[in-house]
Image (cartoon, grey):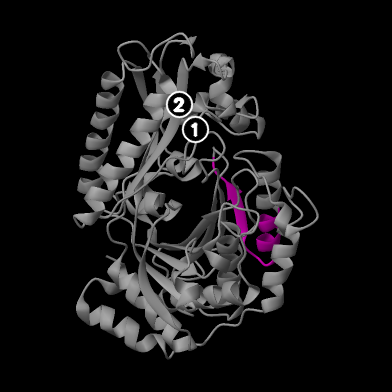
Amino acid sequence: MHPLMRCDRTRKWALENLAMETQFIISPSNISKHLKELSKIGNLGERLEDGFLRASWSDEETAAMEYIRAQGESAGLQGRYDAVGNLFLSTPFDKEENETSTGEVIQIGSHLDTVPRGGLFDGGAGIVAGLEAILAVVKSEKALKRRLELVIWRGEESGTFTTVFKGSKAAFGILDASCLENVYGGVTLRHAIEGQGYDASLIEQGTATLAQDSIDSIAAHFELHIEQATKLEKDNCDIGVVSSIRGPRRFRITLYGEAAHSGATPMGSKYRSDANLCMAHTIVALDGLCSQHIAGGKDLVQTVGIINTDKAVNARHPEIYESAITKVSPLAYFSLDIRSNNKATLESYTQSALSLIQDKADELSVKVEIERVGSSDPLEQLDPCLQDLLEQSARDLGYSSQRLSSGAGHDVAVVAQQRKSDGTTIPTALVFIPCRKGISHNPMEFATDDAIHKGAMVLAQAIGSIC
């Protein structure tokens, strides 16, 4: 629990007196300026609708981070990269000048990488809002008892190098080292990290880039993100205060059949080992299984996003190109993404789904290989006191708000599960702002300057009340 909110009396004090704090000033033109500059980095055309590609540990991701670093440092923040390339922009602190300081830090974090042909606002909106929120508090000349820090995590997206939350997990020493050999654009993740001047060996060793005393000092960690869904937009609501975050279990399912003549080989598993047929039956059966669990009240979503179309996989399995209209298919593969906001549900359903996949392969005389390609535990509850704080901040600013769950994963969930020396976890909070038609991971992704400005104001009001 947050140090200022350790008991009901203290928590009540913080919320009641939040309205007395100065409302901080953020210029909407600054939001527009930052977005305009970021739109020039990793853009795939002259329009936002042409999309973006800032791959993990790419020149483009680095350039976007350097732009934000320059903006922060020009306003008096101090920037530093950790050993794997995460960027930390902090308010300066000299304990001799401020004996009232607690030595703690309040962070706002997000990312600037994108999925291939993604949009400008997934991650970017949170960084722009976070930067302006911190600078608004600094410019108010409020005496800070806690430092403020903007964190830009490397490689949040799994769209490049397959693995999600790469930078934040590496910072805490929990990134699976096997992902270093994942390939994107003909380059391994290891070489991408080293190519940007950072140390991949720490990931291999499972060594955190953040010292334990640095982790202990994090009093609260906030993130702002576009909703990536339509509830806020359809409810005409300004701010979403997130209560839980779904965690994923991700797999690549490869089915090995046997090539045969499509006309001469009788149908049926007695005669054919048809990888494509097995894949089709399996996907339909998985949909039915998941629907049954949802009907039983379980929080679940499941998606098959890739079928025989991953360039990296095809490079390892060139036989995928040997399929023909006159052949029984010898090879097929698909991705499976399972998510829930309840860990027990996620684990139980995942086991049922994997058993179904094996049963279908046996039934249709096909061999199956199940490869786990990424996972994160759900965050079943973000910090309740910080949720209250965000709601009160929105209310003081005259903005509408509601609580809701996040179907997508975010770096804040990684931060929330890290332990301090006293055994407690880091208090975390997630703010949603509406995005047009809920579209994300798409060139049509869009959030208005006004929506980002309101989110930044809520962040400023919240962090300003507890720093």
Query: Do we see residue 74 in this rendering?
Result: no
- Asked whether residue 380 is drawn in magenta, I would say no
Taking depth in this image into account, of 135 and 375 the one nearest to the observer is 375
Disc 1 element: loop
Which residue is rendered at x = 63% and y = 43% of the image?
Answer: 116
The residue type indicated by label 2 comes to Tyr
Residue 268 screen position, x and y as percent: 33, 17
Which residue is rendered at x = 44% and y = 82% of the image?
Answer: 394
Q: How many marks?
A: 2
In the picture provided, is 115 more to the left or to the right than 292? right
In the picture provided, is 84 more to the left or to the right than 241? right
**What number is the disc on residue 321?**
none
- Asked whether residue 68 is drawn in magenta, I would say yes
Query: Picture quarter containing residue 449?
Result: bottom right
Residue 5 screen position, x and y as percent: 28, 73
The residue type indicated by label 1 comes to Ile
Boundaries of the magenta span: 67-82
Pointer 2 residue:
333
In the picture provided, is 246 more to the left or to the right than 177? left
